[in-house]
Amino acid sequence: MERSSSDPDADLAAFAQRYATVRERTERLAAPLSAEDQMVQSMPDVSPTKWHRAHTTWFFAEFVLGADGTSGRHWDLPEYRFLYNSYYEAVGARHPRPNRGLVTRPSSAAVAEYRASVDKEMAELLSTGDVSPQLLDTMVLGTHHEEQHQELLLVDIKHVLSMNPAVGPAYSDVVVPPADDPGAADFVEFSGGIAEVGRSFGDVGRLADGFMFDSEGPRHEVRVYDFRLADRLVTAGEWLEFIADGGYERPEFWKSDGWARAQSDGWNAPLYWRPDPDDPDAWWIHTLTGLRDVDPHEPVCHVSHYEADAFASWAGARLPTEFEWEVAAARQLELDPSAVERGCLDTSADSTFHPRAAGPRNGRLRQLFGDCWEWTSSAYEPYPGFAPAVGAIGEYNGKFMSGQQVLRGGGALTPPGHTRVTYRNFFHPHTRWHLGGLRLAKDAS
Amino acid sequence: MERSSSDPDADLAAFAQRYATVRERTERLAAPLSAEDQMVQSMPDVSPTKWHRAHTTWFFAEFVLGADGTSGRHWDLPEYRFLYNSYYEAVGARHPRPNRGLVTRPSSAAVAEYRASVDKEMAELLSTGDVSPQLLDTMVLGTHHEEQHQELLLVDIKHVLSMNPAVGPAYSDVVVPPADDPGAADFVEFSGGIAEVGRSFGDVGRLADGFMFDSEGPRHEVRVYDFRLADRLVTAGEWLEFIADGGYERPEFWKSDGWARAQSDGWNAPLYWRPDPDDPDAWWIHTLTGLRDVDPHEPVCHVSHYEADAFASWAGARLPTEFEWEVAAARQLELDPSAVERGCLDTSADSTFHPRAAGPRNGRLRQLFGDCWEWTSSAYEPYPGFAPAVGAIGEYNGKFMSGQQVLRGGGALTPPGHTRVTYRNFFHPHTRWHLGGLRLAKDAS
Amino acid sequence: MERSSSDPDADLAAFAQRYATVRERTERLAAPLSAEDQMVQSMPDVSPTKWHRAHTTWFFAEFVLGADGTSGRHWDLPEYRFLYNSYYEAVGARHPRPNRGLVTRPSSAAVAEYRASVDKEMAELLSTGDVSPQLLDTMVLGTHHEEQHQELLLVDIKHVLSMNPAVGPAYSDVVVPPADDPGAADFVEFSGGIAEVGRSFGDVGRLADGFMFDSEGPRHEVRVYDFRLADRLVTAGEWLEFIADGGYERPEFWKSDGWARAQSDGWNAPLYWRPDPDDPDAWWIHTLTGLRDVDPHEPVCHVSHYEADAFASWAGARLPTEFEWEVAAARQLELDPSAVERGCLDTSADSTFHPRAAGPRNGRLRQLFGDCWEWTSSAYEPYPGFAPAVGAIGEYNGKFMSGQQVLRGGGALTPPGHTRVTYRNFFHPHTRWHLGGLRLAKDAS
Amino acid sequence: MERSSSDPDADLAAFAQRYATVRERTERLAAPLSAEDQMVQSMPDVSPTKWHRAHTTWFFAEFVLGADGTSGRHWDLPEYRFLYNSYYEAVGARHPRPNRGLVTRPSSAAVAEYRASVDKEMAELLSTGDVSPQLLDTMVLGTHHEEQHQELLLVDIKHVLSMNPAVGPAYSDVVVPPADDPGAADFVEFSGGIAEVGRSFGDVGRLADGFMFDSEGPRHEVRVYDFRLADRLVTAGEWLEFIADGGYERPEFWKSDGWARAQSDGWNAPLYWRPDPDDPDAWWIHTLTGLRDVDPHEPVCHVSHYEADAFASWAGARLPTEFEWEVAAARQLELDPSAVERGCLDTSADSTFHPRAAGPRNGRLRQLFGDCWEWTSSAYEPYPGFAPAVGAIGEYNGKFMSGQQVLRGGGALTPPGHTRVTYRNFFHPHTRWHLGGLRLAKDAS
């Protein structure tokens, strides 16, 4: 694997800066939350804030500091290894995921200590300059791993707060103004053929924008047919039309598994939409800034793949394949390299922590990388020639390549710089608690 | 209903003292627990500590202060009425019991404020002297209600702490010394005949030891046959013999429902017993003072009615009926009126918060009122002439008179003065998280 | 144990006649049913007809012929012992109850062969005259056991046929005429005191009316208070009023366990009542003679104990204790010894296989022994001095003495001669598929 | 859509012959089964034999005879439409799938009448010659639909018979001789590039080998990389090695979803393998010819996709994509067009109804089209340009394109002529009751 720089010391210094930035962001995101907020696991998919803070730290303790032979510190206690391992079956027994919300000890305060101790050790290690390229790779992976958990921390706490029956529990007090109407979507046509997608480790280094997850490669050719893509995300207003037209009651739009799930779980709107008790046609939405009216101009989010697919069918369209999306997004980025920076996580004081409405029509694909992750019609499968890494870190992506669906782009809770055109996010098709939205596709006319 | 005193002012002053004592004890019991500890509901039967503190307060806000027309205070907010009502169906919608552990707001700190506000209002009300006998009755009930929740708070937090996989999470750091061998049990014979049991409101006032729950009455006659009762509780050592003799594998000792539950839940020892990983024949026990060896001389507790019944069958004995127990206990109290004070909740600094071994044999029934609640063979049914109170408080006991089993006596976590010879505790026969133990009975020889 | 006759040969001859009668009735009851009908287990509580026919036969093969040392016949095959043992844990492993409807082989025809083979062996055994009193006791028990299963066969097949979505699957084609109005119920007063209830083996033999189940004894004294009993069963018409008054929506009438079950199972009427699709206020009822209108003058049946208890509470009454019922019924029988014969199973060609409306008021308790089993407020508990029999047959009754509720009297599907004044039927309080109805009680005025 | 013949009368005559053949085969397959056997639904995925016989008939009654305006016949009764509709949501309410085993009426005999009546009507319709091309298409589809259900009937009855705890319930009494050792597998290399896969309606007619399901098209290009394919299926003997090497206990071989399912369902061998009670290292297998030893030379079948994938991972290989399989099979068929006829359903008297061992190595891909369906790594997704048919028949395939995995080839229970090189079978990845086996693939060396 090539490095992004031929100067190891510069690499380490750059990484130390990145490490500090990422680690600090996690604590900033947790800061508004009480010890009680950080304790709760509101469903098996959700993890407590406290757990995210500890698990991301455990990654460094286990795979970096442990690998270097440090010992005798409290993060080496068996219970920390047991509690904060998540899916690495190879690293001993794991604490059952649905029980994370029952672990009262260590407390949030003890987790803060744990973080500080590991950060101190990491700083010392980095200052020695004695870090092998392989270990640096693992460290870099640890920061990208933590960025993933920052997004999860936010979608998880949104779910936790939604369990409070009292009106309006908010993560932030910012007031969100109504959005401007983005206008009807345009369909932009793309020509097909043989296209290259994905990325190979041989082409990039691990640092900065050079980083990639193993599932993004190898770079390879696919045959894509001519297609069209909507120039913006589907809006809440369009979803209201779908509901009004019986979208949740008409099986002809739905896949069989999706219909069964919609019935068994009683879906009649996106997650977090609640009927306005005073107006049967109006909906409220629970957000990180509290309960408010649904804004028809915002993109719809917190819909499952099943709902997204049914909506597309209702709309006479379909979801794009992940390769159509990547081909289109790559061309977009040639026109506007800054697109990947827009709409991602804003941690400033006036952040709404919510996807924003599309800006005015501009002939290009809007909302590609922030706002909502976009469900595709592609199952999460290995690329030709894919091989998982050796050892526990090899469990990172490959083991999830069954039963999950690819989402592309990025979301309003994705840390800046984390996503890219080849990035493959994935969730089970019934899940709704993350920021899944959709963009329509059609065959070429 | 007669009053315990002909002087209403004295009644109020006595009650004010009792109120302060009871309310303070709740906070004292919660004090060693972190915000995280107080947040967790480890199974549907368990409530978070924070919830117990708020619900017992809600009782006064709803039935006393509300009844007096106070208003505009934060305990009148709909969400407090909604969140902290428990089983009073008559008082509006209720928050689903299994979701109590998801309510992060109000926080523990807010609950403390809530308690202080209500206490202040209560003090003001009591100081006016303008309290009807009916309202005083409700207030007195509120304090006995809170005492019940003090015991629940402790058995619930024991369960919560048991979920921490780390070794040894303790409520108290006291070290428990080994107990002395209480010797084999003696069976004391009692003659039967027509006996009076229970208590009538007409005979007692509501205050102090005059208080009774509606389910304890009316006083009435029952026909009891000659019987024998063991002079102490069954010990952990005797339970070890039951296990060693295949007690959990031999259906011939078990009731049908009990055997089915034991199989489905995989019981092979009392709740909180854990096999010593280093010695297949030894057991550890999780207690409020942490994990330690099972002490064979202590009474066994945290067994279900099903297990207690199977043990009795294995031992060639049976469980007593609740009337046999009451007849025997009443005679014991004639010999030693202080028996009812022994073994109940000790909140001193060196309390073990655990049932203690029986003292030396003394020709009487030992361990009658503290240590462990004693499962009886009697279903919890209304006494002849029983009628529930009118209104929401009428839901207090009568609605539970189906499917539950009576326990008599008291336990090591029962507040002093709370129990008495006519007291009828009750739980479903499969439950184990409370302090249920057993005393053997036999027909007269 | 005394015998009903001092002449053993006469005993055997009488038993041989009884055996033939009982065994023939089982086959007669199964005759209208197809192989498909006899195959189905529509819920875990239900057993297939084929299974009932085989299991009652297994009883004789296992406990009578097996006990006599016969061997080499196909009922000795391990799979027959395995398949057709029901709750006798002591007789080896059992086939899981919920899987009875999956056993296609042996077929109904093979079960008929099995029955014939065992009957032939039994006839040979009886003809030898070489039967010990103990073995004769077991045989007699076998016939009473088979009578119990005859009633179960009928309530089970009613449930099975109710699963057919097609309109009107009937066990019999008899057309049921509307019933006459039995008029309002009268409450008959009974004086209490010390009463003797139950029956002792020492007082009776095993044959004919001398038979008793172990749970009916020993005879003993109970203290009963003055009470009143309705002179007829609650009718479907009265139940319609309960429904119209919100009986299924008002928790104040219900026990806590009952309310929870009613909500989780969505009860809004007795089992087998179905809303008339053309008239929102009218109900149909599925019966063994097919689907027809609910007749308001018939007794209500197929209600759970929870519903019966809620109805009584709504009606300002209560359910009787089993001892009140027995005391009243014993007095009734002194006035009219033939009452125990009325209303039980009629297998003639024009039988309706359904409880009938009460006859005209006559100053006595009507419908005591046939029509519907009557839920009492008494849990099914052992009488003082009760001891289960030794060996597998000891599992007959004692192991069910937990969590079940006593029903007294008899039902329209109870074989004639099977029930009596001391008979204790029992079911879990949530069950509805058997013929449970109710009679109201009140305290003395 | 083009027709396979320009002579409509010849088309109809050919179809009438095909119709008779297919319909007769269904009854022949059901003939060995008793009414009880045909009644049972042993799990929700399984349907009773009786149901398969009726549902395949309903297809013609609903979509052919109904479409032609026939009426007044008993197959127009609402309950038949209700009971025997399966997944066509568009055709009114459906009977819940898990309750199919509760419908005792109509009986098997009534279903036979239903089949005969519809066949008579169909014969009359065909004899008129007045059949539109569209209606003939639907009829042809009906016969292919019935062939699919013939295979399901057999895998379903295998599961039903497996529920009989008695030893050896068999569909057929044929004795299966031990198979010859097929030798180690060879990996055959195939070159990649741009390949055409699938089939277009424009290219084929509906009749005979011209038929295709909509999901097989449109024909389109895919990019395939060089790959290797094993020249035979994985054998039971190789699976024994997997088990012996801890295959079911080592999470490193498994996908995350698969591991979770294996744990929750307790998998430790293929479905139908049962440990030999006398030899801990030996396995028995339940087959349609009864219980016998596992033959190591036979292909393994009744494994889930999860197990197949884990095995491949353990073996240092992977599953093929569906396109790799199709490319390789197409080339094979050029060499040996008869390969598609081998190994499929044999209904002769000495059929074993089980996959057979591979023949001797011959430099080609053995066992491609019969024996076992082959799990691929491809999710069941629509091909580019796929559009479901209009109306209820449009639900045939498209609605299942979520959460299912493609299997290619054919099985020992697939009717001859039913499968082909473009055929896409599909099941959920956890399912095991169908004939799923596997062939290993590798990247080119």
Image: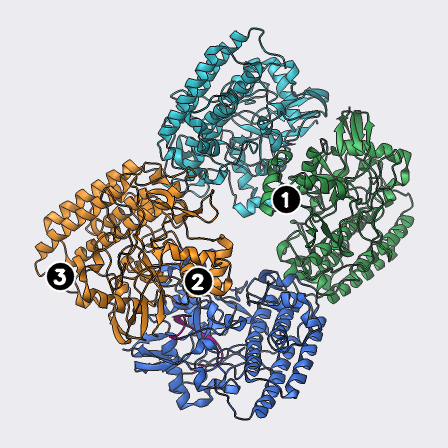
Chain colours: A green, B blue, C orange, D cyan
Magenta extent:
B364-385
Distance Cα–Cα, label 3 vs label 2: 44 Å
Q: Mark 2 points at which residue?
A: C310
Amino acid type, callout 1:
Ser
Q: Residue furthest top?
A: D7
Amino acid type, callout 3:
Ser
In this rendering, which labeled residue sits more in front, label 3 or label 2? Answer: 2
Q: Mark 1 points at which residue?
A: D256
Which secondary structure is most common in the magenta stretch?
Answer: loop
Distance Cα–Cα, label 3 vs label 1: 70 Å
N-terminal-most mark, 3 or 2: 3
The chain ID associated with circle 2 is C
Q: Can residue A96 be seen in this view?
A: no
In the rendered image, the quadrant that contains the C terminus of chain B is bottom left
**Decide: marks 3, 2 in contact (CB < 8 A)?**
no
* C344 shown above or below D194: below
C49 left or right of B353?
left
The chain ID associated with circle 1 is D
> Helix, strand or loop at disc 3?
loop
Q: Name the residue under label 3.
A: C4
